Amino acid sequence: MESKAYNAFKMAQSQFDKVADLLDLEQSTRDLLRNPLREYHFSIPIRMDDGSSKVFRGFRVQHNDARGPGKGGIRFHPQETVDTVRALAMWMTWKCAVVNIPLGGGKGGVICDPHNLSMREQEQICRGWIRQISRDIGPLRDVPAPDVMTNAQHMLWMLDEFEAIHGAKYPGAITGKPVGMGGSLGRTEATGYGVIFTVREALREMKIRAENTVASVQGFGNVAQYAIRLYNEMGGTVCCVSSWDQADQTSYAFRKADGIDIDELMAITDRFGGIDKAKARDAGYEVLPGDAWIEQEADILLPCALENQITGENVGRIHKRVKIISEGANGPTTPEADAVIQQRGIFMIPDFLANAGGVTCSYFEQVQSNMNYFWEKGEVLGKLDVKMTSAYLDVSRLARERDIYMRDAAYVISINRVAQACKDRGWV
Ligand code: GLU
């Protein structure tokens, strides 16, 4: 469900302004950080399979690179807007800063719907996107990665085009590449696992055993799938997942009170995370309309789909049993809903902390690519756990000490680090 006046960039700016006031940040630093440093808007003309030509709009926004090259994914989505990309780029700056990796924030997008494009057409979009931006990205400038509806194959096409243009191998120019082609083991799992590392730490602080908890999950793409796997391994039960139904252009929730079976659901899920309703019913799932995932009797909510999902309209439907929300998606909670969640005392693990596992593993991928020496999966995931856990503990400690909301505490840490880098460089 979308709230009407929603604008992701305004929301990202209002979150920033709130903490800038708290920090008494000087005006020049505010002016610098509440807008992107640079942005690129361009057209990508494609020859379609039927011989016709079609033009797609593409974007790359570089929010801030004071702490290191820009970093962030590229999304393919029919409702993509430049304001969404601006917000996502800004959140990437805070995300890299909160886990303390030497990267800035960027994000890209193309307005397109991969459901309706062949693989060849998608390849053309990837190559066309790189052709438009190839001089303004790169390992020392800004490094794209996968995001909503893009994957390792898309990244390899992009890298191939980048290397063809520049006439040399640049494995650090793109992350999220396939394993064996410069990709890191564990990258696919990293975002979802990272979400659950933060949940595990929150449960530990609350002295609650994971095996006694139930979670409800929004989304069934890469982030949700691996979050569910690790949460199940910890003993938790997922009572409900929701997924987007392309044919009906709406979401459905799939409920099994004694716990969904991830492998059973994966077997009836398409590559975009869409679950087959008829087959799910046959397998004993209750199929509920719309955003029913939000009102389940659960201890933990994991919004792992898109922005603008927990809104003023549906926040009141969150069950009184819910204790923790960990945001696997970027920007799933509107400020209006956030205020209600804070006031109800639900423990919020904010997006740019909860879902930082993906970019942290991207950073490991760059490090491995630079050394041309690749680590075992256990080593990657072990290092990821260390980074995520220490970032979580820094934020939760600050939230407790200053008695502030977790989202604000995460912002305080990130904004301080980025503002300091800008100051040290003499920018402000
Ligand atoms: N797209 C992911 C995110 O939003 C990962 C970005 C990256 O690996 O650079 O965090």
Image: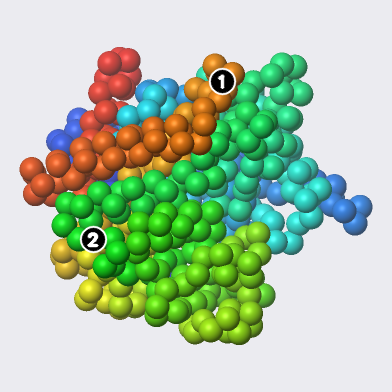
Badge 2 is on which residue?
A: 209
Query: As displayed, is residue 195 above or below residue 371?
Result: below
**Left/right of residue 83 with respect to residue 53 in the rendered view:** left
What amino acid is found at the position of numbered circle 1 in the picture? Tyr
Q: Position of residue 395 (x, y in %)?
A: 21, 42
- Picture quarter containing residue 389? top left
Quadrant where the N terminus sits is: bottom left
Quadrant where the C terminus sits is: top left
Q: Position of residue 368 (x, y in %)?
A: 53, 23
Mark 2 or 1, nearer chain start: 2
Q: Quick one: label 1, few (<14), some, or many (20+) residues within 10 Å?
A: few
**Left/right of residue 192 with respect to residue 49 in the rendered view:** left
Q: Secondary structure at mark 2?
A: loop
Q: Position of residue 19 (x, y in %)?
A: 21, 43
Q: Position of residue 245 (x, y in %)?
A: 60, 73
Q: Secondary structure at mark 1?
A: loop
Q: Is mark 2 within 8 Å of ligand 1?
A: no
- Picture quarter containing residue 413? top left
Q: Is mark 1 within 8 Å of ligand 1?
A: no
Q: CA distance from mark 2 to mark 1?
A: 38 Å
Q: Residue at x 23, y 60 (%)?
A: 209
Query: As displayed, is residue 323 above or below residue 52?
Result: below
Number of numbered discs present? Answer: 2
What amino acid is found at the position of numbered circle 2 in the picture? Arg
**Left/right of residue 356 with respect to residue 275 in the rendered view:** left
Q: Residue at x 27, y 16 (%)?
A: 424
Which residue is nearer to you in this view: 256 or 112?
A: 256
Q: Residue at x 23, y 31 (%)?
A: 416
Image mark for residue 373: 1
